[in-house]
């Protein structure tokens, strides 16, 4: 028999040291280290543990919306979310279900769920846009943002507002700095006038999106402004940063600026939003090739994901400017493009993106629901095996169990899955899944 064949049959064992040989068969050795060694280790690393926990507290406990819908400030009217839902349903009725490569059985299963979502909660997160999307006259911006705030407050009082709302004002660059802060002041003042209770204690308050951030100094300077706005108007404010400049990804010192921004913003930071077209244009990418799936976009978003990992903030995908409008073939082509980008983002762990047109809700929810429903059977089997410690073809670790439970929870949150079917698949309810997913207590597990 060849030597290599013998080696495969007889595992190699290193010879035992003399000390180990002498101890073989005797009573176990007693602990030899003094307590002072352990105490000194704790003394040195205890503060490090505390600092790391403060900087990386883990996943947020609240529901993450699957999208953010941007609407120009001058186009925000009472009943906006319901109107988007009706427009999406009208597009679906007029043009028929898009061909997204799904089986007929899957489409038949998804369509009633899609229609129910568009009728019940078509918009999960709404952002009043007073920046690039705003096309009103400069002298009309004050009135437009006040009217938008009044409309949102009225919808909140009527129970038809999206679960999450906010505003994107202008950047902190010199030419737009004062205008941007004034817009926030006017918007929040109008919200308070129309609805003294603001947007309710059960929400994150009002989300403020800061665009075109170029340095950590802007984030640090903006935090006292948010404190002052909270004190003046009584609304809780969450912060989002838009990553749409090269300087926000890579600084002059070679460091990942966005990571420093995340920790400078602290617990107020809700997420980082990728700006598809501003970022691509700043890199000199030709307009025809500016897209959320460009390699430059992938790099920026991967850096964003690394920067927010474990902090509680979230990395959010950008938009596509190819809208489902026009003739039927144009609408279906835009739906296929949008759904493909949504699916691609979900596969890469980006669970939220931008929508700019009501008809994009069709492709957003179809792609999202297909993703989460397709993930359920395997996730349920692996979670069951993990909880029961049964033998299976895959040996999952706690980190993987967290990811599996997190995906199921996201499917429940957005309406892709139902509580009873998840329980039937794996015997787990939301509280069980939340514990496995490592969600901190105190958050809302369902906003539906």
Image: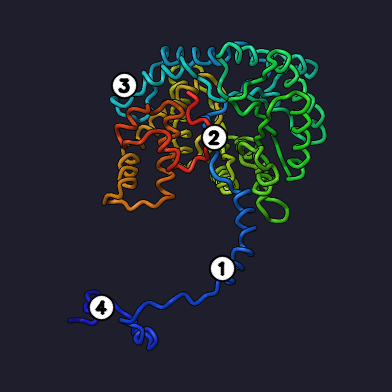
C-alpha distance separating marks 3 and 2: 37 Å
Q: Which residue is mark 2?
A: 442
Secondary structure state at the residue bearing disc 3: helix
Q: Nearer the viewer, mark 2 or mark 4?
A: 2
Camera-near label (1 vs 2) is 1
Specify which label sits upstream in the sequence, 3 or 1: 1
Q: Position of residue 131 (x, y in %)?
A: 70, 26
**Which callout, 3 or 2, points to the residue nearer the camera?**
2
Q: Mark 3 and mark 4 in contact? Answer it, CB < 8 Å.
A: no
Residue bearing mark 4: 7
Which residue lies under the disc numbered 1? 38
Residue at the far left: name it: 1
Q: Choose between 90 and 109: the one closer to the eye.
A: 109
Quarter assignment of residue 140: top right
Quadrant in which the N terminus appears:
bottom left
Mark pair 1, 2: CA separation: 34 Å
Which mark is on residue 108? Answer: 3
- Against 381, residue 206 (above or below) is above
Whether residue 324 sits left or right of residue 177 in the image: it is: left
Give the alpha-carbon distance from disc 3 to disc 1, as whole Å.
Answer: 62 Å
On the rendered structure, is 57 left or right of 363?
Answer: right
Q: Which one is earlier in the sequence, the residue at label 2 or at label 4?
A: 4
Sequence-earlier tag: 1 or 4 = 4
Give the number of the mark in front: 3 or 4: 4
């Amino acid at each position: 028999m060849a030597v290599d064949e013998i080696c495969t049959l007889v595992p190699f064992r290193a010879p035992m040291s003399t000390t180990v040989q002498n101890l073989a068969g005797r009573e176990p050795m007693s602990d030899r280290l003094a307590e002072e060694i352990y105490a000194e280790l704790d003394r040195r690393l205890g503060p490090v543990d505390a600092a790391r926990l403060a900087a990386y507290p883990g996943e947020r406990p609240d529901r993450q919306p699957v999208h953010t819908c941007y609407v120009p400030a001058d186009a925000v009217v009472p009943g906006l979310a319901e109107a988007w839902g009706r427009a999406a349903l009208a597009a679906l009725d007029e043009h028929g279900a898009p061909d997204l490569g799904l089986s007929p059985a899957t489409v038949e299963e998804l369509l009633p769920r899609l229609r129910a979502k568009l009728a019940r909660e078509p918009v999960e997160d709404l952002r009043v846009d007073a920046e690039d999307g705003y096309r009103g006259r400069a002298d009309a911006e004050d009135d437009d943002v006040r009217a938008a705030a009044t409309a949102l407050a009225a919808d909140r009082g009527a129970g038809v507002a999206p679960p999450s709302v906010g505003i994107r004002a202008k950047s902190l660059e010199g030419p737009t700095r004062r205008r941007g802060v004034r817009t926030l002041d006017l918007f929040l003042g109008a919200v308070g006038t129309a609805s003294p209770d603001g947007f309710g204690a059960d929400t994150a308050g009002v989300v403020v999106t800061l665009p075109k951030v170029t340095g950590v100094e802007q984030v640090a300077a903006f935090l006292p402004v948010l404190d002052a706005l909270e004190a003046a108007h009584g609304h809780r404010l969450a912060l989002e940063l838009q990553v749409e400049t090269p300087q926000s990804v890579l600084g002059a010192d070679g460091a990942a600026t966005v990571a420093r921004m995340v920790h400078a913003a602290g617990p107020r930071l809700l997420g980082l939003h990728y700006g598809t077209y501003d970022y691509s244009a700043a890199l000199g990418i030709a307009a025809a090739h500016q897209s959320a799936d460009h390699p430059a976009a992938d790099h920026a978003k991967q850096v964003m994901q690394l920067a927010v990992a474990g902090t509680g903030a979230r990395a959010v995908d950008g938009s596509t400017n190819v809208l489902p409008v026009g003739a039927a073939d144009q609408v279906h082509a835009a739906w296929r493009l949008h759904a493909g980008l949504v699916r691609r983002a979900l596969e890469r762990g980006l669970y939220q993106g931008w929508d700019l047109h009501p008809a994009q809700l069709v492709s957003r929810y179809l792609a999202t629901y297909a993703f989460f429903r397709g993930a359920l059977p395997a996730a349920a089997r692996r979670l069951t095996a993990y909880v029961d410690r049964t033998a299976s073809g895959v040996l999952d670790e706690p980190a993987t169990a967290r990811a599996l439970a997190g995906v199921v929870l996201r499917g429940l949150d957005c309406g892709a899955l139902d509580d009873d079917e998840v329980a039937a698949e794996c015997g787990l309810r939301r509280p069980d899944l939340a514990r496995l997913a490592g969600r901190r207590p105190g958050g809302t597990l369902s906003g539906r």
